[in-house]
Image (cartoon, coloured by chain):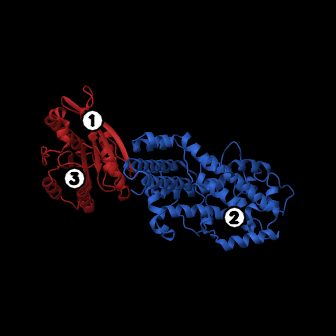
Amino acid sequence: LTSVSPSPPSLGDQRPALEPGTHVALDLPLSMEPAPGPVSRAAPAPRTEPAPVATGEAPPEPIPGLCHPSAVREKKQHRAGLCPIMAYTATHLAQQLTLMDAEQFKKVLPWECLGSIWTEQERRDKELVVPTISAALSHFYHVADFVLPTCLGTCTMKAQDRARVLGLWCWRCQECTTLRNYSSSRATVTALECPPIHQLKKPWRAVSRRSLISFFPLCTEKAPELMNDCVHKLGISKLASVENNLQRAQMRQWRRKQGIIPCLGTFLTNLVLLKKRTHNAMDDWTSREGGVHSMKLQAIKILQQLQLLQVTVENFRFELDKEFQSWFQTMKRLDQEDKLELSVSSHVH
Amino acid sequence: MAEAQGSPGPWAAPDQPCVFKLVLLGSGSVGKSSLALRYVKDDFRSILPTVGCAFFTKVVELGVSSLKLEIWDTAGQEKYHSVCHLYFRGANAALLVYDITRKDSFHKAQQWLQDLEKEFPPGEVVVMLVGNKTDLSEEREVTFEEGQEFAESKRLLFMETSAKLNHQVSEVFSAVARELLRRRKREGPAQARDAAVALSGGPMRQVRCCTH
């Protein structure tokens, strides 16, 4: 019973042969088309001439024919400093990251979230004690680390180039929120708000207004609230608390055809807070088991909510872009020194 | 009063069918939720491991009388063990489910029985041992006789089922329901007369032994 699906086709079926490092010859050109939608926020295609004058409207200028990663890779070799991420539209990026996030989130075993299990353990044991959670968290940081070098890039990157990349990420963040992928949205915000990127004054000034406007509501403390609102709107918290028949709740969620990937951190924080409250309750009225019991049941309700969300994740059905996925997987994970180096080098220019 | 005991069901309303609480216990992925789903919805599909507890109700018709079963389907995974105890309070009946292809699940069912014995005075709860997944009989690790022997030694009801093939699922629940009604008829008047006697946990009628 490892499959998370009551649904017939699972996302897992679509990605059987994803091996990091294998660069597949491109046989899915269709996947690169910008997703149909009222606002086509295609990112600028790889530019053939250096540093165009117009910096303003970075994301909304689609050049469809050139949005091909292989094309970019070739160009990239000719032109140092151009970031390959610009080959992808914000929508496409958001969808591909969502597929990966969904895969990770589905694997999370709800009981691993129980505060009592993982706060008591040594931090270094986390991978052994709660493997699925640490995998999900590590994926979250990988997404954040993915943002960082694309914005900082090499020292030859010009402020305008950076501005375009920043603009793309702002849009992508917005796209993730639209898709209800709060995990990637939060990871991007975290990355964009971290000091090395935050202090890129010149590029940020050059980022288009439209991008910034789409990004501002997400970058504040409101992000967890946004997620909670959405969870409430879809009635998931209500389903988990009122509906005792789990199977029925799960089927209902699945039929809704709407997926949500929550920010796992928010869940963990809630559970840890609950656990602290439980401890206080034990101190206060040791004789009264009722308080502790009700909190235990509350924790279970939160886990049931998490499980319902895992069911909704089945509803993300985008075409898998193997090229992008393997590129993402092979992307180097940054340690503190790398970040510092990037940060310093980016300030030279 | 009987309410104080946590089992208000059987004696609650005169016109309504009596309500009995039944808990499904057993280790992870033995098919507790599948049994419940098969019985209540006549459906079988792959389901996620239960978190905490799921809850179903079903009215059982037994000839002239009917009763309402509140089925509490608990999580089998070890991690939820401590929470499961919160759910089986006030239960009138318990199904101890094991997987016939997994010996460890059979031992776990025996542990659950010990937990039940700690919580309830003997004979207060109708307990039935259920060996599930008879459709996988070629991988069987627990023989029918083993199950039956254990059930007899502990005076439990016993049956083997397959939730997948819908084999003997409704029989399990109706056997428990019949037993519940039988007890109620015997003990009901006594309890109504003086609930305190029942609370003191006087020797009750022993559970009828395995029907096979």
Residue at (76% x, 71% y) in the render: A344
- Find chain B in the image and tell me its colour: red
Can you identify the residue that label 3 sits on?
Answer: B117
Can you identify the residue that label 2 sits on?
Answer: A148
The amino acid beneath tag 3 is Glu
- Quarter placement of the N terminus of chain A: bottom left
Q: Work out whether residue B19 can be spotted.
A: no
Residue B41: quarter of image: top left
Quote the CA–CA distance across marks 3 and 2: 59 Å
Which of the two discs, 1 and 2, sits closer to the camera? 1
Q: Position of residue A238 (x, y in %)?
A: 48, 40
The amino acid beneath tag 1 is Gly
Q: Secondary structure at mark 3?
A: helix
Report the chain holding disc 3.
Answer: B
**In the image: residue B102, left or right of residue A119:** left
Quote the CA–CA distance across marks 3 and 1: 21 Å
Residue at (34% x, 40% y) in the render: B56
